[in-house]
């Protein structure tokens, strides 16, 4: 009787990591156009919450249903009580994020959200017992240094309420990712489905305010129906493959690219120091990804008999 080798019994760590980082990177790239699309739509606050939330949740539900019909092994739309909790956390984060977008400058929002990895690393250690790797511990302060360079480039102080809302959003996203990672269950749809909650809350305000108010609602439809569900599903699927601090770093891609899109679309030119900070973040993330992938490959080799 042939005994299976340890190599075949152990998961393919390198492939798992590569899959997770691909999802995280693509999700962060798509998410980077979120704020520019909201600005392009020129919509009222509650209109954005309603349209964006309704379309995002419906699109996510449709993707989930199609995946189930095709036999892709997708789990339940909401994975039990913990899944319900994670969905609720994402719902609150969605509301606070939009408060931040409307109450402070877009650059403030994405820079403050860059604190996400720090929250995620601490929460993963405290809740899930996942001690950050040396590469992660090095990457987090370096990426935050990049953010500080961008902020130091002359960023104007935004409204304190918006800044606090952005800070709370970063913490809640990190908490949701950490809980999803701890559960070991597929919660990739939680963040997109959660958008239905603020949409329901916004409905009476839109109705009493004279209906949908938007100068270019097409951008909002693209944002809600395509951009948000695609980005959030990819980012929410990340904890299935990699630790949540690594998933949180995907949000740093938005930190770098969103100001660039704002410059290209609205001629808000980033300063040279901002570009230096952004380059530092991108370089650190690339080096971190390569270091983690190499470590997992070494682990795979070590398991071979």
Image (cartoon, rainbow, N blue to C red):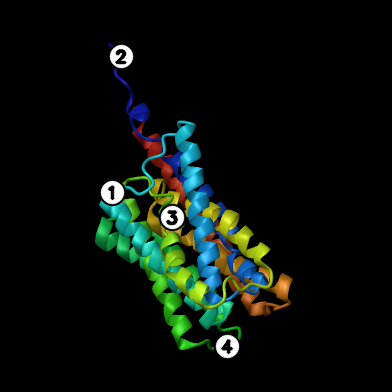
Q: Are marks 2 and 3 in contact (CB under 8 Å)?
A: no
First-in-chain label (2 vs 3):
2
User: Residue 291: percent from the left, percent from the top?
Assistant: 48, 52
Pick the front one: 301 or 165: 165
Whether residue 267 is situated above or below residue 221 in the rendered picture: below
Depth-wise, is mark 2 or mark 3 nearer the camera?
A: 3
Residue at the spot x=55%, y=81% of the render?
Answer: 151
User: Residue sitting at 47 percent across and 68 percent down?
Assistant: 203
Kindly identify which numbered label has been placed on residue 80.
1
Q: State the CA–CA distance, disc 4 to disc 2.
A: 67 Å
Separation of residues labelled 2 and 3 (CA atoms) = 46 Å
Query: Is residue 226 or residue 47 the one in the foreground?
Result: 47
In the figure, is residue 94 to the left or right of 209? left
Asked which secondary structure carries label 3, the reply is helix
Q: Which residue is mark 3?
A: 193
Gap between marks 1 and 3, in whole Å?
14 Å
SS at mark 4 in the image: loop
**Which quadrant would the N terminus be assigned to in this image?**
top left
**Tag 2's secondary structure?**
loop
Q: Quadrant of the C terminus?
A: top left
Circle 3 packing at 10 Å, graded few (<14), some (14-19), many (20+), is many
Q: Tag 2 or tag 1, which sits nearer the N-term?
A: 2
Task: Say if residue 184 shows up in the picture.
Answer: yes
State the residue position of label 2. Answer: 2
SS for dot 1: helix
- As measured in the structure, the alpha-carbon distance from the residue carrying label 1 to the one carrying label 2 is 39 Å
Above or below, 233 against 114 in this view is above
Between the residue at mark 4 and the residue at mark 1, the CA separation in whole angstroms equals: 44 Å
Residue bearing the label numbered 4: 156
């Amino acid at each position: 009787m042939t005994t299976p080798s340890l190599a075949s019994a152990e998961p393919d760590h390198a492939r798992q990591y590569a899959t997770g980082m691909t999802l995280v990177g693509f999700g962060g790239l798509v998410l980077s156009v979120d704020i520019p699309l909201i600005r392009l739509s020129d919509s009222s606050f509650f209109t954005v919450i309603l349209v964006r939330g309704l379309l995002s949740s419906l699109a996510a539900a449709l993707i989930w249903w199609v995946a189930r019909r095709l036999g892709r092994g997708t789990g339940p739309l909401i994975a039990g009580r913990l899944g319900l909790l994670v969905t609720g956390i994402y719902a609150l984060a969605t509301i606070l994020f939009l408060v931040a977008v409307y109450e402070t400058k877009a650059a403030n929002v994405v820079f403050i959200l860059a604190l996400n990895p720090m929250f995620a690393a601490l929460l993963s250690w405290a809740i899930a017992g996942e001690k950050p790797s040396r590469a992660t511990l090095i990457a987090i302060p370096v990426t935050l240094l990049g953010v500080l360079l961008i902020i130091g480039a002359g960023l104007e102080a935004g409204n304190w309420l918006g800044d606090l809302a952005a800070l709370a959003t970063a913490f809640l996203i990190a908490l949701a990712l950490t809980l999803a990672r701890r559960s070991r269950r597929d919660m990739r749809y939680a963040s997109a489905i959660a958008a239905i909650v603020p949409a329901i809350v916004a409905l009476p305000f839109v109705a009493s305010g004279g209906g949908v108010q938007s100068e270019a609602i097409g951008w909002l439809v693209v944002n809600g129906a395509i951009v948000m569900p695609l980005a959030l599903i990819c980012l929410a699927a990340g904890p299935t493959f990699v630790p949540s601090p690594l998933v949180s770093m995907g949000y740093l891609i938005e930190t770098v690219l969103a100001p660039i899109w704002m410059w290209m679309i609205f001629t808000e030119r980033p300063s040279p120091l901002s570009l230096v900070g952004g380059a530092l973040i991108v370089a650190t993330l690339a080096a971190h990804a390569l270091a983690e992938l190499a470590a997992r490959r070494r682990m795979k080799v070590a398991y071979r008999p």
